[in-house]
Image (spheres, rainbow, N blue to C red):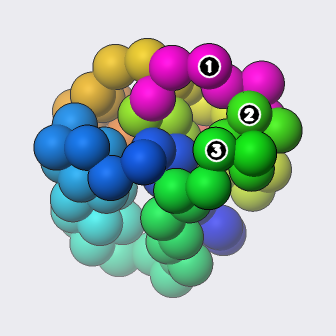
Amino acid sequence: MKIEVLGPGCPRCQALENNVRKAVEELGIQAEIEKVTEMPRIMGYGVMSTPGIVIDGQVKGFGKLFSKEEVVEMIKAAG
């Protein structure tokens, strides 16, 4: 599983990355976590407000700081 955290490095983006790492640890799964800070790549996903989260190439949400629990649900739904 590949999880991308989209954002330029703002505090909310950093907090989302931490929540993603905690969710992966809680679930005990193997996942590649990548921080995407380049605006052309972020906009390539159609994301206009950050932070955002992409799981296996699918945008799961953007524009707010998702909690660890919300990230856990996104990961479970992505299979």
Quick check: marks 3 and 1 in contact, CB under 8 Å? no
Residue 59 on the magenta span: no
Q: Height in image: 70 above or below 68?
A: above
Please name the predominant secondary structure of the magenta segment in the image: loop
Dot 2 lies on which element?
helix
Q: Quadrant of residue 1?
A: bottom right
Q: Which residue is mark 2?
A: 43
Q: Is residue 2 visible?
A: yes
Q: Amino acid at mark 2?
A: Met
Q: Say whether disc 3 or disc 1 marks the residue closer to the N-terminus.
A: 3
Q: Height in image: 19 above or below 42?
A: below
- Circle 1 crowding by C-alpha within 10 Å: few under 14, some 14–19, many from 20: few
Q: Which residue is mark 1?
A: 48
- Circle 2 crowding by C-alpha within 10 Å: few under 14, some 14–19, many from 20: few
Q: Amino acid at mark 1?
A: Met
Quick check: marks 1 and 2 in contact, CB under 8 Å? yes
Provide residue 18's location: percent of width, then percent of height: 21, 59
Determine which of the numbered discs, if any, sits on residue 39 in the image: 3
Q: Height in image: 62 above or below 56?
A: above
CA separation in Å, label 3 and label 1: 9 Å
Compared across the picture, whether 47 is left or right of 16 comes to right
Q: Is residue 75 visible?
A: no
